[in-house]
Image (spheres, rainbow, N blue to C red):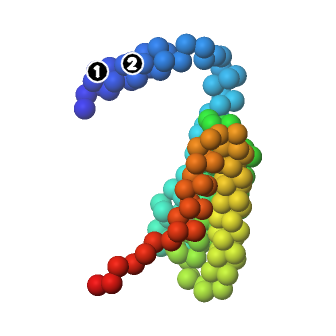
Amino acid sequence: MNSRAFMGILLVMFGAFLFFNQGFDFGTGHIIGLLWPSMFVIPLGLFFHWMYFSMTGRKGTGLLIPGGILVTAGVVCQISMLFDSWGYMWPGFIFAVAIGLFEFYFFGGRNKYLLIPISILTVLSLIFFTVFSIGALLSSFSNQPILAVVLILFGAVLLVGWKKRPV
């Protein structure tokens, strides 16, 4: 793709963004405040990965732990900043440690004892994600008739039950 086509695509996307976001503030502080994880945290994590993969002989496996933590935490922070979902995304920081340790396990010596904290941290973060997501979902639908209809239908199915036909 030549540079004119790339620049044209960028201008069309920026114009569409301006058209659909009429009330958006384009101040430098607002942009940096919104995109700081993509500007500072994720590149630092990618730098740690680049340092490991560019080494000959792959000796610095310890670089993968902070690299995995920073990339995952940066993604969690970026999603939280864009969608204002800090209350639901915080278990991602627990998961970030599990990712860093898993990279160390996978590319390192495959020490099987590392799988214990990796599993504990992963399950813990998934439990917290599930609990807080279901809680947020139920609180947002608490006044909605949709939830009532779904609960009534589910209860009716449980009461009546599905009858199996003999084969």
Determine which of the numbered discs, if any, sits on residue 140 in the image: none
- Residue 165, given in percent of the width and then of the height, sits at 35, 79
Mark 1 closeness class: few <14, some 14–19, many ≥20 residues within 10 Å: few
Q: Amino acid at mark 1?
A: Arg
Q: Earlier in the sequence, mark 1 or mark 2?
A: 1
**Residue 160 in view in this figure:** yes
Q: Is residue 15 left or right of residue 67?
A: left
Determine which of the numbered discs, if any, sits on residue 11 in the image: 2
- Is 141 situated above or below 53? above
Write the residue at 47% across / 68% down: 56
- Residue 137, given in percent of the width and then of the height, sits at 66, 48
- Residue 67, given in percent of the width and then of the height, sits at 61, 58
Helix, strand, or loop for circle 2?
helix
Towards the viewer: 45 or 51: 45
Q: Is residue 29 left or right of residue 111?
A: right
Mark 2 closeness class: few <14, some 14–19, many ≥20 residues within 10 Å: few
Q: CA distance from mark 1 to mark 2?
A: 10 Å
Write the residue at 55% across / 73% down: 59
